[in-house]
Amino acid sequence: MKFVTSVVLSLFSLYALASTEYAPRFDFRLYKKEAVNTGPTILIIGGIQGDEPGSFNAAALLATEYTISRGNLWVVPNLNFESIIKRSRGVYGDLNRKFSRLDRNDPEYELIQKIKAIIQDKQIDMVLNLHDGSGFYRKKYIDKLHSPQRWGQSIIIDQEKIKTRHYGGLMALAKQIRETVNTAINDEGAHYHIRNTHTREGNVEMEKTLTYFSIQNQKPAFGLEVSKEYPTHERVYYHLLLVESFMRKLGIKFKRSFALQKAAVRDRIDNHVNLSINDGKIYLDVAHARRRLTYVPLKKSAPVNLDSGSPLMAIINDHKGYRVRYGNRHVTYLQPQYFDYDSSLKKVSIEVDGQTKIIALGSIVKIRNNLLVDPLPGYRANIIGFKKPGLKNEVGVLIRRSDISSRFSVDRSARLFRLEFYKDNKYCGMLLLSFNNKKSAQLSRLSANIGASVP
Ligand SMILES: [Zn+2]
């Protein structure tokens, strides 16, 4: 195995403050995924418009689920993060029309300067800007859905070629990529077409875009459009097919943590949404969470720190609790109960189905039948939803799923429960108990570690 460095740069800190005086900041992130084996660098931009989930979900997977063993991949998965979280195309107007002239007072002025600097970085050899477009682009009008006015399933260039040392033949390269990708797509309706917007010949709208800014700075750039006619996971699938073929073309070597199949992509997006707060003190799988979680032990008079797992997740202070957003989706609402925190307990010993396991707080425990927390002097264990008259501490008690009331589960199908630990009246941390069912076992097999063997 070759070494891979993966650096996450958050341009500002990514947390929501407990106080209502401050609005949460929604700054984009830059992931630099760099291999020791040197090679070209592609910059991927996702989420330039907030209502294009194919784009930002694909970029988020590239940022978090890919490892690079030759060359480099820089990924900005959530460029227009505030609009993504607020499910708007652009809270302050269309971000992809702000790359030529922009008023200094524009609320996105700073953001634009930052992304421009990244594009201009001398390490960048190519820029791919991911979009979800309407219908299907066709050079000649076929019907309302397939026409020159549509954008879906197309590779977009601003002009035939640009003067640059590498990859300046935009049209030639787009054609090669199109051939490769289309042979991998059985459904002919989903095949890619190339759209040349001839921007410098007076295309006023396209002059304001990120790709045109890129090529004016001698950076080969392509707009990649999937069709909004497809559900999100299929859009992501098509985006990844396209991005991967660009990576192969440039000799960037990679692996991903899932198979490039529609079902596996869907599983990745829908079933792996973890929420970690305050250094793992709260750790929840919220992929199928209830709309509201109550008595969540948050820290007294302190900001709620979202740990930087997914670039698409945000916590927003709202009345007396917190809304949890994941891309365009509402995940859950946290109704807090405030505690002082205690950090003396890092791990606990638990009998899981009769087997002793030492488990770090802030992780998931998979259980088939039962569990029992081993003796833990000085601490109190509390499974939310478990009640036995007269029992205040659940250490040393054999507990089965049927002993816990379903309505206290984290998830809607009542498999996930919170096991919390306290010292005196201070909160120490939690484990997430996951009671097994067949469906979850099937799905986790889809996410087996599968390398990049597809063309
Ligand atoms: Zn777009």
Image (cartoon, rainbow, N blue to C red):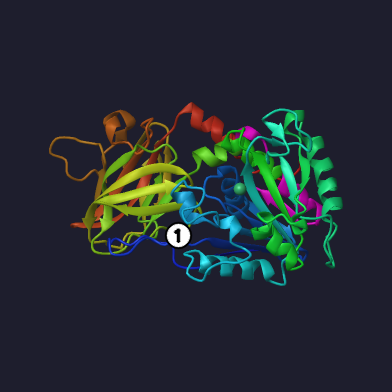
Answer with the quarter of the image where residue 368 lies: top left
Question: Which residue does the image show at 30% across and 35% down from the upper left?
Answer: 399
Does the image show residue 115? Answer: yes
Q: The C terminus lies in which quarter of the figure?
A: top right
Does the image show residue 257? Answer: no
Q: Of residues 184 and 308, which is closer to you in this image? A: 184
Instruction: Determine whether, in the image, residue 168 is placed left or right of residue 114.
Output: right
Q: Determine the secondary structure under disc 1.
A: loop
Q: The N terminus lies in which quarter of the figure?
A: bottom right
Check disc 1 and give the amino acid type.
Phe
Instruction: Determine whether, in the image, residue 53 is placed left or right of residue 385.
Output: right
Q: Position of residue 19 (x, y in %)?
A: 27, 62
Instruction: Determine whether, in the image, residue 263 is placed left or right of residue 88.
Output: right
Check disc 1 and report the residue beneath it: 26
Ligand 1 neighbours mark 1 (CB distance < 8 Å): no
Q: Position of residue 335 (x, y in %)?
A: 26, 47
Question: Which residue does the image show at 52% across and 69% down from the upper left?
Answer: 110
- In the rendered structure, does residue 262 fall within the stretch colored magenta? yes
> For the magenta stretch, what is the residue range?
242-264
Up the image or down, 34 lies above or below 402; here it is: below
Q: Position of residue 230 (x, y in %)?
A: 61, 33
Question: Which residue does the image show at 75% across and 50% down from the upper left?
Answer: 197
